[in-house]
């Protein structure tokens, strides 16, 4: 009798432990393993993208006129691949992620977050960087992260819209954290841009997952700041306050103009160009790619790629960039995006902001140029995305700019408010197009 009781007790204990382990696996384990996977893929994607752009620059250095051939051919190939095989991977990917969080349709989530889209996002955007196009990898990393973690839901016997959204938000934010090595910005991005709500039941797990992805990237890439550590004075002169206000308003207006043109291309494009885009997208892509190639060639190569190296050079005070860098970069970014090629706008937007900061130094020559550039970068990013808190936090982490906390925050908030007065939020507006019935592919 005693043996039977002991046997029953052991079975009860084993069953209880098994249930507890299973519950922990579903509550934490799936999220954490998925976050580690997102971090690994984000790092691999970053290295692949850097290698592709380095190869492009190597070819350009040896054959000066090669981009005039490579860029148009690669551009058409990228658009064809996207439209033919990877519909849903076009653009930065953040609008798709927002749309899947808002949508209650599993079929729409499955289509926009499929593993095919993940592969297409990485492959085609990497190919685009080999063509020298103005592409960032941060938005795609959000899309890839959300897709990877969303596809981890197979661990649940029964899924639900709430569970799906948790995976999507955690994966997208983890992708951003790993791409920029900015885990705090990933957390803020999850609540400001993707989820727009705070659920106490899931927030701890979500935040831990985001931080894990950042830790994976940190372990592989080392402890670094994306743009290095800027050198600014401990005390700023009174004119610095004026500079903050001027830069915030100026970048707010420029960001609003850029967003409006991206969101309303059909309203400012001439009729023949609009018809070319709608009826012959590959021909339109060829025209845009040729413009990108010509601008890159005539500008001496300053508009190729994401603009990371130019922004880093300006922030470090080591070199100057052509004063036409910002306006030319705006054109190449717009051409790249309107083609419908997979690729983000985060890094190019920051680079454009750096160019505007260099222009601000002409107005405020007595101020530290790196401080002006940092202000313009955060202001322009906040104006384009209308996510001021994410913009401020991401900029602070990328430059180790704790000495500029108040000025960066003020610039981001003012620039975003100025932009909001003229234009709707960029990513949120684009996401609504993916929620329209029957939408399978959209060229913006």
Image: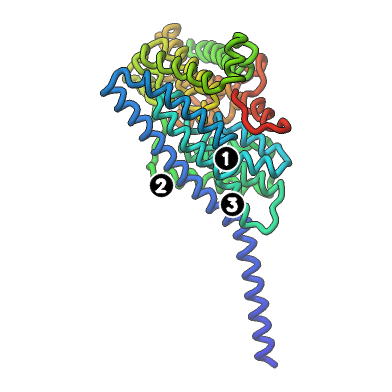
Earlier along the polypeptide chain: callout 3 or callout 1?
3
**Along the viewing direction, whichever of 237 and 368 lies nearer the viewer:** 368
The numbered dot on residue 219 is 2
Local SS, label 3:
helix
**Along the viewing direction, whichever of 438 and 192 lies nearer the viewer:** 438
Residue drawn at point x = 68 percent, y = 83 percent: 8
**Along the viewing direction, whichever of 85 and 429 lies nearer the viewer:** 85
Choose mark 3 or mark 1, whichever is in front.
3
Residue 265: which quarter of the image?
Answer: top right
The numbered dot on residue 62 is none
Percent coordinates x, y for residue 30 in the rendering: 58, 55
Local SS, label 1:
helix
84 is higher (above) or lower (below) than 349: below
Residue drawn at point x = 42 percent, y = 7 percent: 362
Earlier along the polypeptide chain: callout 2 or callout 3?
3
> Looking at the image, which residue sits at the far left?
62
For disc 1, the marked residue is 172
Instruction: Let me know if residue 369 appears in the view.
Output: no
The Cα–Cα distance between marks 1 and 2, rounded to whole angstroms, is 20 Å
Choose mark 2 or mark 3, whichever is in front.
3
Percent coordinates x, y for residue 108 in the rendering: 68, 40
Percent coordinates x, y for residue 412 in the rendering: 56, 22
Asked if disc 2 and disc 3 are in contact, CB closer than 8 Å, the reply is: no
For disc 3, the marked residue is 152
Answer few, some or many: residues within 10 Å of disc 3's Cα (few below 14, many 20 plus, some between 14 and 19): some
């Amino acid at each position: 009798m005693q043996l039977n009781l002991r046997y029953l007790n052991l079975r009860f204990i084993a069953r209880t432990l098994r249930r507890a382990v299973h519950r922990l696996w579903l509550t934490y384990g799936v999220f954490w393993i998925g976050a580690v996977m997102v971090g690994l893929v984000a790092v691999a994607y970053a290295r692949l993208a850097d290698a592709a752009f380095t190869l492009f620059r190597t070819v350009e250095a040896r054959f000066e006129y090669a981009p005039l051939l490579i860029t148009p051919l690669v551009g058409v190939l990228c658009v064809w691949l996207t439209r033919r095989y990877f519909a849903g991977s076009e653009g930065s990917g953040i609008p798709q992620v927002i749309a899947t969080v808002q949508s209650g349709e599993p079929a729409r989530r499955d289509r926009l977050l499929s593993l095919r889209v993940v592969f297409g996002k990485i492959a085609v955007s990497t190919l685009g960087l080999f063509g020298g196009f103005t592409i960032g990898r941060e938005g795609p990393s959000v899309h890839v992260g959300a897709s990877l973690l969303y596809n981890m839901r197979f661990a649940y016997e029964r899924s639900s819209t709430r569970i799906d959204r948790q995976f999507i938000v955690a994966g997208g934010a983890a992708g951003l954290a790993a791409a920029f090595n900015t885990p705090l910005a990933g957390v803020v991005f999850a609540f400001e841009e993707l989820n727009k709500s705070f659920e106490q039941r899931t927030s701890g797990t979500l935040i831990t997952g985001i931080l894990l992805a950042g830790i994976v990237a940190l372990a592989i890439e080392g402890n670094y700041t994306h743009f290095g550590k800027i050198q600014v004075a401990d005390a700023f002169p009174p004119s610095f306050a004026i500079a903050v206000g001027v830069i915030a308003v100026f970048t707010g207006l420029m960001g609003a103009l850029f967003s409006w043109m991206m969101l309303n291309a059909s309203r400012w494009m001439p009729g023949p160009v609009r018809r070319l885009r709608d009826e012959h997208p590959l021909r339109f892509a060829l025209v845009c790619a040729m413009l990108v190639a010509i601008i890159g060639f005539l500008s001496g190569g300053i508009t190729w790629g994401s603009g990371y190296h130019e922004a880093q050079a300006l922030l470090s005070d080591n070199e100057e960039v052509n004063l036409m860098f910002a306006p030319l970069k705006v054109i190449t970014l717009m051409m790249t995006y309107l083609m419908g090629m997979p690729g983000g706008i985060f890094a190019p937007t920051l680079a454009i902001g750096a160019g505007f900061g260099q222009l601000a130094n002409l107005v405020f020559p007595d101020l530290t140029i790196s401080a002006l550039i940092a202000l313009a970068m955060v202001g322009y990013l906040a104006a384009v995305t209308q996510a001021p808190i994410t913009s401020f936090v991401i900029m602070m982490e990328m430059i180790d700019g704790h000495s500029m906390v108040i000025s960066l925050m003020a610039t981001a908030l003012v620039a975003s408010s100025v932009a909001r007065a003229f234009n709707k939020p960029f990513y949120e507006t684009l996401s609504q197009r993916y929620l329209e019935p029957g939408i399978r592919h959209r060229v913006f």
